[in-house]
C-alpha cells in the first residue's frame, strides 16, 4: 500500500459515520464515496471537504465510481438494507447477500487488489459471501466482527471498576449477534485477571458479570429502540481497524475472519476471533486457551452461522 486510499461503498449512517471519523482522525490520504445514489455521495463529499480546514491532515475526498477501487488499499462495504415488516431473517440475508455480491463483483472488476472490510449486517455471513465472490485470499477479506461488541464490553467493565476502558483487556468472540459471548477466562484489567480484580473490590461481584454481558449483547436493541439505528460506535471501530492496517500495527482485534483450524469449530465459516492485523490484512488468528464452557459457546455460535450460510446456498 503505497498510498492510504479508502473507498467506502454506501453513504448511509454507518458509511458516513466511518467517513466522518476517518476525516477527524486523519487516518487516510484519500477517501472516495460510492453510493447507488451518486448525487448523495457528491453532497456528502462536499460537506466533508468543507471541514478540511479543521482536520488534522490534508485528505482528498470525492464521490466516485467502482473504477476508483483499482488503486485503493482498502474498500469498506457498508451498503445493505434493513429488515422489512413480516420479512424473515433468511429473506433479509438473501437480499443483503445479493447486494454484497453485486458490490464485490463491481469492486473486483476494477482490478482491485487490496483489502476488503465488510461492515454490512449480518456481518459474519456477508464477510463470507464477500470472500467467496472476490477470489481474494482469506487474509484480505475481513468483517468488523465483534470489534464494536468488545468496545462495548470494555466500556461496561470500566464503568464498574472506574478504570479507563483502554486499560481493560477483554474480548467478545463468536457471531456478531445473539450467540456472541465474553471470554472471561482471558479478561484482565491492567494485566490483573478480572476475577482477582473482583475479589479485591466491593463495587463489583460475580453476579455483575452476567449483567455486563447482557448489556453488551442487547446494546444494539436498546440503541435502536431509542434512535432507530446504531452508527457512531461502529464508525469509530472501523477507523481503528483501518489504522491497524495502514499503520502496519500487528494489532490484535476481534474481527470476522475465516476459521482455518486454529479453533476446533466449523472451518468454512467467518466468525469473530482475535486476529493480528497489519498492512497485508490478517497475519494470523490468535489462539486463546478457552474454558470448556467457552469452547462450547464458540462451537454453538459457529454452528448457527454455518446453518445460515447453508440456508442461503453456501
Image: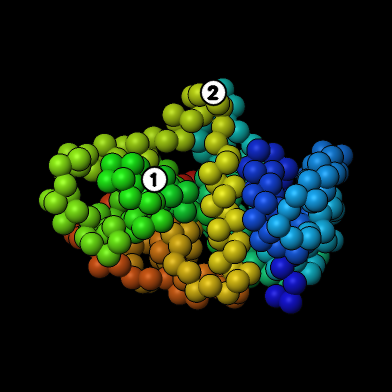
* Residue 209 in view of the camera: yes
258 relative to 301, above or below: below
Q: Judge left or right: residue 183 versus residue 70.
A: left
* Residue 180 in view of the camera: no
Residue beneath disc 1:
155
Q: Residue at x 42, y 71 (%)?
A: 285
Expressed as whole percent of the image width and height from the top left, the position of residue 90 reads 52, 38
Q: Judge left or right: residue 102 versus residue 153.
A: right
Sequence-wise, the earlier of marks 1 and 2 is: 2
Q: Residue at x 48, y 69 (%)?
A: 251
Q: Residue at x 50, y 24 (%)?
A: 226
As rendered, which of 11 and 233 lies closer to the eye?
A: 233
Q: Residue at x 39, y 35 (%)?
A: 218
Expressed as whole percent of the image width and height from the top left, the position of residue 104 reads 70, 57
Residue beneath disc 2:
86
The crowd level at tag 2 (other Cα within 10 Å; few <14, some 14-19, many 20+) is few
Expressed as whole percent of the image width and height from the top left, the position of residue 96 reads 62, 43
Q: Secondary structure at mark 1?
A: helix
Amino acid at each position: 500500500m503505497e498510498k492510504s486510499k479508502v473507498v467506502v461503498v454506501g453513504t448511509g449512517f454507518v458509511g458516513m459515520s466511518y467517513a466522518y471519523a476517518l476525516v477527524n482522525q486523519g487516518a487516510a490520504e484519500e477517501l472516495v464515496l460510492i453510493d447507488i445514489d451518486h448525487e448523495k455521495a457528491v453532497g456528502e463529499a462536499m460537506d466533508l471537504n468543507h471541514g478540511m480546514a479543521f482536520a488534522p491532515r490534508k485528505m482528498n475526498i470525492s464521490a466516485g465510481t467502482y473504477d476508483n477501487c483499482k488503486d485503493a488499499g482498502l474498500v469498506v462495504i457498508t451498503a445493505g438494507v434493513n429488515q422489512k415488516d413480516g420479512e424473515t431473517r433468511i429473506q433479509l440475508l438473501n437480499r443483503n447477500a445479493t447486494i454484497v455480491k453485486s458490490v464485490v463483483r463491481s469492486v473486483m472488476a476494477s482490478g482491485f487488489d487490496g483489502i476488503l472490510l465488510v461492515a454490512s449486517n449480518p456481518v459474519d455471513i456477508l464477510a463470507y459471501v464477500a470472500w467467496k465472490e472476490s477470489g481474494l485470499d482469506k487474509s484480505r477479506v475481513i468483517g468488523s466482527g465483534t470489534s464494536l461488541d468488545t468496545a462495548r464490553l470494555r466500556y461496561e467493565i470500566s464503568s464498574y471498576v472506574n478504570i479507563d476502558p483502554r486499560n481493560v483487556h477483554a474480548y467478545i468472540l463468536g457471531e456478531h449477534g445473539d450467540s456472541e459471548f465474553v471470554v472471561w477466562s482471558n479478561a484482565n484489567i491492567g494485566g490483573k485477571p478480572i476475577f482477582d480484580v473482583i475479589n479485591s473490590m466491593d463495587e463489583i461481584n460475580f453476579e455483575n458479570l452476567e449483567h455486563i454481558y447482557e448489556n453488551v449483547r442487547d446494546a444494539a436493541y436498546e440503541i435502536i429502540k431509542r434512535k432507530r439505528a446504531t452508527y457512531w460506535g461502529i464508525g469509530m471501530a472501523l477507523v481503528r481497524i483501518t489504522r491497524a492496517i495502514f499503520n502496519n500495527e500487528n494489532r490484535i482485534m476481534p474481527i470476522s475472519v475465516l476459521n482455518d483450524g486454529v479453533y476446533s469449530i466449523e472451518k468454512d465459516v467467518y466468525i469473530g476471533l482475535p486476529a493480528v492485523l497489519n498492512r497485508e490484512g490478517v497475519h494470523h488468528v490468535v489462539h486463546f486457551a478457552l474454558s470448556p464452557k467457552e469452547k462450547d459457546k464458540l462451537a454453538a455460535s459457529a454452528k448457527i452461522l454455518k446453518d445460515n450460510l447453508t440456508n442461503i446456498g453456501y
